[in-house]
Image (cartoon, rainbow, N blue to C red):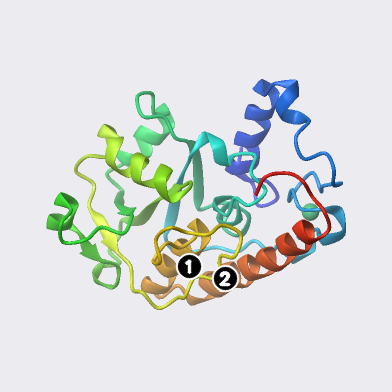
Amino acid sequence: MTTESSNQYLHLRKRKLAEATREFRARGKSVMRCERCQLAVFACLCSCRAATKSRCEFIVLMHSDEIFKPTNTGRLIADILPLQTHVFCWSRTEPDRELLNLLGDSNRSCFLVFPVNEKDPAWQNAIAAEKISSNEKITTFILFDGTWKQARKMFHCSRWLEGIPSVILPNDLASHYQMRKAHQEDYLSTAEAAVLCLRAQKDREPADVLLNYFMQFNKNYLLTRGRGSTSSP
Ligand SMILES: [Zn+2]
């Protein structure tokens, strides 16, 4: 069960950790990490975490490579909006049953968050985020949590997402994501994309809380890396 002190990312991580090989577990042992936030103990982010609520919900489709990456930012959304964030490990051919139930839920309007352009067939029924009407349905944003290349693959190769419109986000946030060099200039981290979704829905408070938490995460992560961690970013 998801409560404010736990979240779906933590459940997924625990499950995958139980399946992980010993070799994997040994990775990144050169620095003492906080069990909960995965940052170095001296740069622990946990005291900055403040769960809040939003009117909309998120589905985070996490690439399996992301689950244990300390640089992952999809998990930050689950930290801040534990009751509104659904987290699933992405599978092209075997999507989780619960995920399909959410996508088929008639009480929701789902939108794919991926930067489509005029050349993309998805452009045809893409909708500007500000134009999404806040009707009685739960606005649900589907985020692709992975590298740029993985996100592209998840967006284009998931047959079970067919028919779900894409959303065009306002571009009013310069990326602060310093951990990974993006090949695409307009590439935002997953957490930043969620901030834009919330802003477009005029859900200011959770947008600000998430952005502040993300900025602090950036800072603490760079501190972690600066002190000789050898684990891959
Ligand atoms: Zn911590």
| Amino acid type, callout 2 | Leu
Q: Specify whether 117 is left or right of 207.
A: left
Which residue is labeled 2 in the image? 211
Up-down relation of residue 16 to residue 55 (above or below) = above
Ligand 1 is found in the corner quadrant, namely bottom right
SS at mark 1 in the image:
helix
Which residue is labeled 1 in the image? 195
- Quarter placement of the N terminus: top right
Residue at the image position 27 percent from the left and 44 percent from the top: 106
Closest to the observer: 134 or 94? 94
Q: Which percent across, then down, holds residue 9?
A: 60, 42
Pointer 1 local density, CA inside 10 Å: few below 14, some 14–19, many at least 20: many
Q: Specify whether 61 is left or right of 100.
A: right
Among the 4 quarters of the image, the one containing residue 51: bottom right
Residue at the image position 71 percent from the left and 60 percent from the top: 221
Closest to the observer: 99 or 222? 222
Among the 4 quarters of the image, the one containing residue 114: bottom left
Q: Which percent across, then down, holds residue 161?
A: 27, 39
* Distance between mark 1 and mark 2 Cα atoms: 6 Å
Up-down relation of residue 31 to residue 26 (above or below) = below
Pointer 2 local density, CA inside 10 Å: few below 14, some 14–19, many at least 20: many
Identify the mark nearer the N-term, 1 or 2: 1
